[in-house]
Image (cartoon, rainbow, N blue to C red):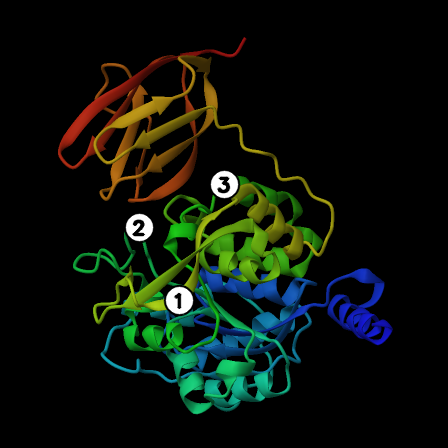
Amino acid sequence: MKGLFALLGAAAILATGCGGQRAAVPVVVDTDMSTDDIVALLYVATNPRLDLEAVAVSGTGLTTCPAGARNALRLLALVGRGDVPVACGRATPLTGANQFPVDWRTRADAFFGLQLPPVSRQPHGTAVDLLAKALAHTHHATLLSLAPFTDTAELLRAKPALAHTLDRIVAMGGAVQVPGNVGPGHEHAEYNVWVDPRAAQEVFASGVPVTLVPLDATNDVPSTVFFSDALRRYHYDTVAATAVWDLDAANPSIWTGGQYFWDPLAAAAVAKPDLLTYTRSTLRVTASGRTVAVRGGAAVEVAVHADRQAFERELLGSLLAGKRFSLPKPNLPAVITFDGNRCTYRGPSQAEAGQVAFDTVNRGVRSFTYLIGERGSPTPELQGETPPHSRMTWVGSLGSGTKSIRCVVGSRTSRVATVVLEGAR
């Protein structure tokens, strides 16, 4: 028994490392270098809970290779991780010819206007070879998939033994109980799954434990002006935060609604999994790229919700390397909700004019638009659209007077509330 306790104690020391802190999780990343991938890769590279071993850049995702790989090398060099090897994945899906829009890919190849110093290093080898080599020398590693599943499926085809040695796969992808984001004709599909459905299905059914972070969870973490304001105040503290702020400056639409922290949330699920709520499900991927829960499907852990404010603190804290910061809790006294049939308003009937902040929540399958303006006036002072099954934060300025809050769904407009805004006292 003494020997057993000694063995258990040694295992605990190895698991937690020196000083009683848990050892960093070894991670290999497959990414397509979109704007949210850039933030996610910076988070992984700077987070003390994670040990980044290798980066594969998908050729079937938003960027093309080697352009995307060169951008990844520049980003890693910026944060002092020039030691991390980078390689390119194959350029075509396992089956079919789905791809991201060409103009999106052109912007991604151009690094979204982000200006970083060039590096002499070049991507080397294939994604499969790089990932296999990194995982062969790393025990209990996590593969973080932030792109279509092509590279991961090819890796498991080439190295089936990894199904027994890889700790788990954490992937951003799919839309299980919410609408997708691909567009007309594919309303239930999410891009990372839709681009290569065969690859996604093979990964789910591979036998490797899979944690899926679908739109169901990422809809809880929209990018907001509150996070942008915090970056504006503190970004000069670290090069990682400065890079995200520069990305914001070059792409202001990131923070103006409709954008989410898709891939950073998946990365946070590796470093701090308690930020999310999960359920067990059995999933199948259809040929059209839809992720459906069915009896007899592949067993997958699915994230269904996320704590937005805790996630924002975690993300900013990592980007700022533990430096002190404040991320004020948004004052959101008002919420406009669409339940699929009608809109409702919860908030004060009187408030002070000036800058206002409020949420819109869409629980329906159709988008809705809110309109706020002077009662009787056809011209709104504020308006915005909220996609299906999502929550968004809005900030704007309203003058004093009696305001009408209206809701537009399709061709139907209805008034949901009247609020009196008083001038500053």
Please state which of residues 409 and 79 is positioned toward the viewer in this rendering.
409
- Can you say which quadrant of the picture contains the N terminus? bottom right
Q: Give the quadrant of residue 414.
A: top left
Q: Residue 121 location, x and y as percent?
A: 59, 85
Ranked by sequence position, the earlier of labels 3 and 2 is 2
> For mark 1, what is the residue?
299
User: Contact (CB < 8 A) between labels 2 and 1?
Assistant: no
Residue in the foreground of this view, choosing between 333 and 288: 288
Q: Secondary structure at mark 2?
A: loop
Q: Say if 277 sits above or below 378 in the image.
A: below
Q: What kind of element bears circle 1?
A: strand
Which residue is identified by label 2?
A: 178
State how far apart marks 1 and 3 are (Cα): 37 Å
Choose mark 1 or mark 3, whichever is in front.
1
Mark in the foreground, 2 or 1: 1
**Mark 1 residue type:** Ala
Q: Which numbered circle lies on residue 225? A: 3
Horizontal side, residue 400 vs residue 76: left or right: left
Residue 242 can be seen, yes or no = yes
- Between the C-alphas of marks 3 and 2, the distance is 25 Å
Residue at screen point 60% across, 43% down: 230
Direction top: furthest residue? 425
Measured from the top left, where is residue 321 in percent x and y?
71, 56
